[in-house]
Amino acid sequence: MRCKNMKRLISRYIDGEIEPKNETILLEHLERCGTCGKEKEAMVSLHKMLAPPSQIEPSPQFMAGLNQKMAPRNSFASYVDLCIDLWVDFFKTSLVDCLKPVSICIVSLLFFILSFYLGNHFGTRLTTEQPPSRKQVVLASFDKTMDISIFNDVPRNSFASAYVNVLKESKK
Protein backbone atom coordinates (compact mmCIF):
# COMPACT_ATOMS: atom_id res chain seq x y z
CA MET A 1 0.00 0.00 0.00
CA ARG A 2 0.97 3.57 -0.51
CA CYS A 3 1.98 6.00 2.23
CA LYS A 4 -1.08 8.13 1.49
CA ASN A 5 -3.36 5.23 2.42
CA MET A 6 -1.24 4.49 5.48
CA LYS A 7 -1.86 7.98 6.91
CA ARG A 8 -5.59 7.22 6.99
CA LEU A 9 -4.88 3.92 8.70
CA ILE A 10 -2.60 5.62 11.24
CA SER A 11 -5.43 7.93 12.23
CA ARG A 12 -7.82 4.98 12.65
CA TYR A 13 -5.15 3.07 14.59
CA ILE A 14 -4.67 5.91 17.06
CA ASP A 15 -8.45 6.28 17.53
CA GLY A 16 -8.78 2.50 18.06
CA GLU A 17 -11.09 2.04 15.08
CA ILE A 18 -8.86 -0.05 12.79
CA GLU A 19 -9.71 -3.58 11.65
CA PRO A 20 -7.23 -6.34 12.68
CA LYS A 21 -6.32 -7.11 9.06
CA ASN A 22 -5.43 -3.47 8.32
CA GLU A 23 -3.59 -3.19 11.65
CA THR A 24 -1.10 -5.91 10.68
CA ILE A 25 -0.58 -4.25 7.29
CA LEU A 26 0.01 -0.88 8.98
CA LEU A 27 2.47 -2.24 11.54
CA GLU A 28 4.49 -3.99 8.82
CA HIS A 29 4.55 -0.76 6.75
CA LEU A 30 5.64 1.31 9.77
CA GLU A 31 8.60 -1.04 10.34
CA ARG A 32 9.83 -0.40 6.79
CA CYS A 33 8.85 3.31 6.22
CA GLY A 34 10.53 5.93 8.40
CA THR A 35 8.37 8.79 7.04
CA CYS A 36 5.16 7.09 8.10
CA GLY A 37 6.75 6.23 11.45
CA LYS A 38 7.44 9.93 12.06
CA GLU A 39 3.88 10.74 10.95
CA LYS A 40 2.54 8.20 13.48
CA GLU A 41 4.62 9.71 16.30
CA ALA A 42 3.42 13.23 15.41
CA MET A 43 -0.21 12.07 15.38
CA VAL A 44 0.21 10.24 18.72
CA SER A 45 1.69 13.36 20.39
CA LEU A 46 -1.08 15.54 18.92
CA HIS A 47 -3.70 13.07 20.15
CA LYS A 48 -2.20 13.19 23.66
CA MET A 49 -2.23 17.02 23.65
CA LEU A 50 -5.85 17.16 22.53
CA ALA A 51 -7.07 14.47 24.92
CA PRO A 52 -9.32 15.69 27.75
CA PRO A 53 -7.55 16.15 31.09
CA SER A 54 -7.89 13.49 33.72
CA GLN A 55 -10.45 14.07 36.43
CA ILE A 56 -9.14 15.84 39.52
CA GLU A 57 -9.96 14.22 42.84
CA PRO A 58 -10.47 16.56 45.82
CA SER A 59 -8.48 15.92 48.97
CA PRO A 60 -10.13 13.99 51.82
CA GLN A 61 -9.86 17.04 54.13
CA PHE A 62 -11.83 19.11 51.65
CA MET A 63 -14.60 16.53 51.41
CA ALA A 64 -14.77 16.17 55.22
CA GLY A 65 -15.05 19.95 55.68
CA LEU A 66 -17.69 20.19 52.97
CA ASN A 67 -19.76 17.39 54.49
CA GLN A 68 -19.56 19.04 57.89
CA LYS A 69 -20.78 22.37 56.52
CA MET A 70 -23.60 20.71 54.63
CA ALA A 71 -24.75 18.57 57.56
CA PRO A 72 -28.29 19.47 58.65
CA ARG A 73 -28.54 21.59 61.77
CA ASN A 74 -31.07 20.15 64.12
CA SER A 75 -31.03 22.68 66.93
CA PHE A 76 -33.18 25.79 66.98
CA ALA A 77 -30.21 27.88 68.18
CA SER A 78 -28.20 27.02 65.07
CA TYR A 79 -31.18 28.02 62.91
CA VAL A 80 -31.48 31.36 64.73
CA ASP A 81 -27.73 31.94 64.36
CA LEU A 82 -27.98 31.24 60.66
CA CYS A 83 -30.88 33.70 60.26
CA ILE A 84 -29.04 36.40 62.20
CA ASP A 85 -25.91 35.89 60.09
CA LEU A 86 -27.97 36.19 56.91
CA TRP A 87 -29.65 39.43 58.07
CA VAL A 88 -26.36 40.96 59.19
CA ASP A 89 -24.76 40.10 55.86
CA PHE A 90 -27.78 41.54 54.03
CA PHE A 91 -27.60 44.86 55.85
CA LYS A 92 -23.84 45.09 55.59
CA THR A 93 -23.80 44.69 51.85
CA SER A 94 -27.22 45.40 50.41
CA LEU A 95 -28.14 48.53 52.35
CA VAL A 96 -24.81 50.21 51.68
CA ASP A 97 -24.88 49.12 48.05
CA CYS A 98 -28.43 50.50 47.67
CA LEU A 99 -27.62 53.82 49.32
CA LYS A 100 -24.66 54.62 47.11
CA PRO A 101 -26.62 55.13 43.86
CA VAL A 102 -29.46 56.92 45.68
CA SER A 103 -27.05 59.33 47.36
CA ILE A 104 -25.28 59.97 44.04
CA CYS A 105 -28.63 60.82 42.41
CA ILE A 106 -29.62 63.16 45.24
CA VAL A 107 -26.27 64.99 45.19
CA SER A 108 -26.42 65.30 41.40
CA LEU A 109 -29.96 66.70 41.54
CA LEU A 110 -29.00 69.23 44.24
CA PHE A 111 -25.96 70.29 42.21
CA PHE A 112 -28.14 70.78 39.12
CA ILE A 113 -30.71 72.86 41.05
CA LEU A 114 -27.99 74.98 42.67
CA SER A 115 -26.27 75.54 39.33
CA PHE A 116 -29.54 76.54 37.68
CA TYR A 117 -30.41 78.95 40.51
CA LEU A 118 -26.96 80.59 40.58
CA GLY A 119 -26.80 80.84 36.80
CA ASN A 120 -30.22 82.43 36.62
CA HIS A 121 -29.50 84.79 39.54
CA PHE A 122 -26.12 86.04 38.35
CA GLY A 123 -27.03 85.88 34.67
CA THR A 124 -29.80 88.46 35.09
CA ARG A 125 -27.47 90.76 37.00
CA LEU A 126 -24.89 90.69 34.27
CA THR A 127 -27.40 91.60 31.56
CA THR A 128 -29.15 94.56 33.23
CA GLU A 129 -27.44 97.03 30.86
CA GLN A 130 -29.23 97.57 27.59
CA PRO A 131 -27.24 96.63 24.54
CA PRO A 132 -26.27 99.59 22.35
CA SER A 133 -28.73 100.49 19.61
CA ARG A 134 -27.88 99.97 15.97
CA LYS A 135 -27.48 103.72 15.49
CA GLN A 136 -24.96 103.92 18.34
CA VAL A 137 -22.98 101.01 16.92
CA VAL A 138 -22.91 102.59 13.44
CA LEU A 139 -21.84 105.98 14.81
CA ALA A 140 -19.13 104.48 16.97
CA SER A 141 -17.73 102.56 14.03
CA PHE A 142 -18.03 105.65 11.82
CA ASP A 143 -16.04 107.74 14.30
CA LYS A 144 -13.32 105.13 14.34
CA THR A 145 -13.11 104.89 10.57
CA MET A 146 -13.68 108.47 9.37
CA ASP A 147 -12.78 111.81 10.84
CA ILE A 148 -15.38 114.54 10.11
CA SER A 149 -12.85 117.33 10.64
CA ILE A 150 -11.59 116.84 7.09
CA PHE A 151 -14.84 118.43 5.87
CA ASN A 152 -14.27 121.73 7.75
CA ASP A 153 -13.08 123.53 4.61
CA VAL A 154 -16.18 122.64 2.59
CA PRO A 155 -17.91 125.79 1.21
CA ARG A 156 -21.09 126.85 2.93
CA ASN A 157 -24.41 126.34 1.17
CA SER A 158 -23.05 123.46 -0.80
CA PHE A 159 -24.40 119.95 -0.90
CA ALA A 160 -21.32 118.72 0.97
CA SER A 161 -21.88 121.25 3.79
CA ALA A 162 -25.45 119.98 4.22
CA TYR A 163 -24.12 116.43 4.44
CA VAL A 164 -21.49 117.45 7.05
CA ASN A 165 -24.19 119.19 9.12
CA VAL A 166 -26.29 115.99 9.12
CA LEU A 167 -23.30 113.98 10.24
CA LYS A 168 -22.49 116.39 13.05
CA GLU A 169 -26.08 116.37 14.31
CA SER A 170 -26.33 112.58 14.21
CA LYS A 171 -23.20 112.44 16.33
CA LYS A 172 -24.89 114.37 19.11
Image (cartoon, rainbow, N blue to C red):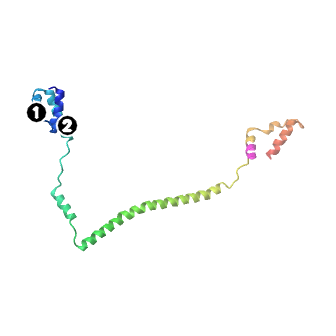
Specify few, some or many for label 1: CA neighbours under 10 Å numbering under 14, 14-19, or 20 or more: few
Question: The magenta stretch spans which residues?
Answer: 134-140
The residue wearing badge 1 is 21
Query: Per the image, is 135 magenta?
Result: yes
Q: Residue at x 19, y 27 (%)?
A: 4
Which amino acid, mark 1?
A: Lys
Name which of mark 2 and mark 1 comes first in the sequence: 1
Specify few, some or many for label 2: CA neighbours under 10 Å numbering under 14, 14-19, or 20 or more: few
Which amino acid, mark 2?
A: Leu
The location of residue 127, given as percent across then percent down, is: 66, 54
Question: For this rendering, which residue is in front, 89 or 117?
Answer: 89
The residue wearing badge 2 is 46
The location of residue 167, given as percent across then percent down, is: 81, 42
Could you tell me which secondary element the residue under label 1 belongs to? helix
Q: Residue at x 16, y 33 (%)?
A: 10
Camera-near label (2 vs 1) is 1
Which quarter of the picture shows residue 139? top right
